[in-house]
Amino acid sequence: MTKIKTAMIAGGGIGGLVTALKLHRMGITVRVFESVETIKALGVGINLLPHSVRVLTELGLADELKAAGIPTAELLYVNKFGQKIWQEPRGEAAGYHWPQYSIHRGRLQMLLLKAVKEQVGEHSVRTGHHLKSFQMMGGVVTAQFENRKTGESLGSYGADILIAADGIHSAVRKCFYPDEGLPKFSGRILWRGLTEAEPFLTGRSMIMAGYQDQKFVAYPVCPQTAQEGRSLVNWIAELAVPGEGPSRSDWNRKVEKDVFAAPFANWDFGWLNVPRLIEETKDVYEFPMVDRDPLPQWSFERVTLLGDAAHPMYPIGSNGASQAILDADALGEAILEHGDAETALRAYEDARRGPTANIVLANRKNGPEMVMQIVEDRAPNGFTSLNDVITQRELEDISNQYKQIAGFDREKLNQIVGAL
């Protein structure tokens, strides 16, 4: 049996909740502390790659995922004229043992929250508890919490380890790296929305159109809408912008469509009408594309970082949520293998810090989406034959290299056998 008996998790997002499920299955008493007073189904669409779906399947959530998400059938890159650059099957359609899911982020979080309350305990998640400070003494981590709105002290709690899954603005990360400053702005802004529309392509397709400075992403996220012959489409419009980007207080703010819609006015590809999709959306939200530099260290004695607290990355390659889930799995496996808390947390860091740093840096170079930029650079006015612009070998190499970097090479992943 592991010497770690108790764990505190700061943050009730996807990474924190999956970590709670993983550690509970190992017999560890877990408490999750979340800053917001009520966890709501907020956000828009995300993707779960097969390696993260494997982890969630081993945690007993296969049926819940199937009911909540769309099993992605294919990924398609096109230029700004809708001409196909790259197309590949995804998930089970590509021969993986597990699906890839396109899913509403809030729906996934509520699914996980329900599972934690059922499996770990109704009172295992304490909302309205913002981590104020912590100390490590005598083999225990003691943390102090407060109500972030009122400043009221909510007392202290202790555990064998503290896991910081508190996001890109992590309070724990700031304790260890007080001079790091704000997240790094890419020079690009994302506008996101959800629209019910006619299905496009397979009805389970994920498309990316354009190039680095002007891009549009779309994919369906609701199986119930699909059963009715319609499609609830999650879309992202992205543009390069001058300046420093919105301040933190303005992230996720609702904006008018005329802020960004004009550059996409002619993007009607026949099989997808981008301006109509934007126009028919009720609410649009604005986000800066930001990340942080990879860190030299995540684990400090009995405290470690996880998910966006450890490795926030650009939303390229459908990787953010998936990597947090992989963190949770790796942390649990390290604790199983190493009885000592400090040794286990170092082993977890050794397993995950290098690979996630590689993804952060690859995403800064556009990850697999670099094929769109290559085509824009070589054929800004479109093309008659794609082979005159980029070779099939180049396309395949870029796709395969990113799968290796992100940890979902099909052959390697399919060799993983066994469950908890």
Image (cartoon, rainbow, N blue to C red):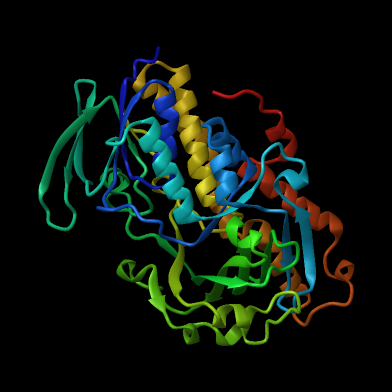
Q: Nearer the viewer, residue 81 or 100?
A: 100
Numbered-mark total: 0
Residue at 61% x, 50% y: name it.
101
Residue 188 spot, x, y in % from top left: 50, 71
Q: Horizontally, is 149 left or right of 307 in the view?
A: left
- Location of the N terminus by quadrant is top left
Spot occupied by residue 109 in the image (x, y as percentages of width and height) = 43, 49
Compare residues 125 and 297 and report the one nearer the observer: 125
Asked whether, in this view, residue 320 is left or right of residue 33, the answer is right
Q: Is residue 103 above or below residue 213?
A: above
In the rendered image, is residue 106 in sight? yes
Q: Toward the viewer: 169 or 41? A: 41
Question: Which quadrant is the C terminus positioned in?
Answer: top right
Q: Residue at x 44, y 68 (%)?
A: 288
| Residue 350 appears in view | no
Residue 38 in the figure: left or right of residue 338 = left
Residue at image coords 57%, 87%: 262
User: Eyeballing the image, is 241 above or below 339?
Assistant: below
Is 233 on the left-hand or right-hand side of 111?
Answer: right
Q: Residue at x 17, y 58 (%)?
A: 149
Q: Residue furthest front?
A: 228
Image location of residue 18, percent across then percent down: 44, 38
Residue farthest along the left direction in this orientation: 152
Residue 96 place in picture, x, y as percent? 72, 40
